[in-house]
Amino acid sequence: MRITSFDEFKDLARRGTFVPVCKEVVADLLTPVSAFLKIAEDADYAFLLESVEGGEHVGRYSFLGKDPFLILKARGDRTTIEQAGAVTVSARPFIDTLRRTMTDFRSPFVPDLPRFTGGAVGYLGYGAASWFEPVLEDLGKGVDG
């Protein structure tokens, strides 16, 4: 297991706004899902990410989190930012708000840690596809035929 000295931690803090911290847990009797259920029990927001690759059936890493410090939501043309109990409405489209928000957060690379050491975690509904790809604007109109 990698151990970061305090001097290395201070150096990493100068290179980013967040310093990745990793803890290896021996969990012979604990599955990722049961761990998630324990931490998510009293949380409004929580996540579990698994790092299954190739033909593996069990993930090499499990990433768990809860209680985000910032929440972005989009409904129609309205984008809201929730942070520290305050709600702000952004005039920008959601994807632009997300990009702008993420520029404020940098995490330095730390060798020997998993590839994912933090960042935005969330989900996008099908309607978000138009933010990334050209799609039909109104699927509810049907097809003449």
Image (cartoon, grey):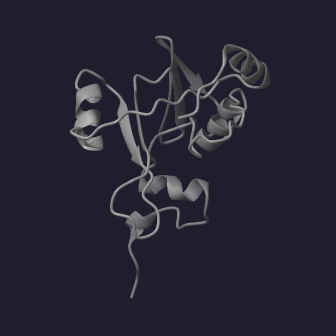
Relative to 24, say whether 9 is above or below. Answer: above
85 left or right of 13?
left
Residue drawn at (54%, 25%) of the image: 81
Residue drawn at (74%, 25%) of the image: 16
Residue nearest the observer in this picture, 82 or 105: 105
Find residue 29 and report its image quarter. top left
Relative to 6, say whether 135 is above or below. Answer: below
Name the residue at the bottom extreme: 145
* Whole-percent x, y for residue 36 in the image: 29, 35
Residue drawn at (68%, 28%) of the image: 105
Residue nearest the observer in this picture, 143 or 58: 58
Residue 25 makes an appearance in the image: yes
Residue 92 makes an appearance in the image: no
* Quarter occupied by the C terminus: bottom left
* Whole-percent x, y for residue 42 in the image: 25, 20
Find residue 4 and report its image quarter. top right
* Whole-percent x, y for residue 134 in the image: 61, 65
34 left or right of 103?
left
Count of numbered tags: 0
* Whole-percent x, y for residue 122 in the image: 46, 41
Residue nearest the observer in this picture, 59 or 17: 59
39 left or right of 110?
left
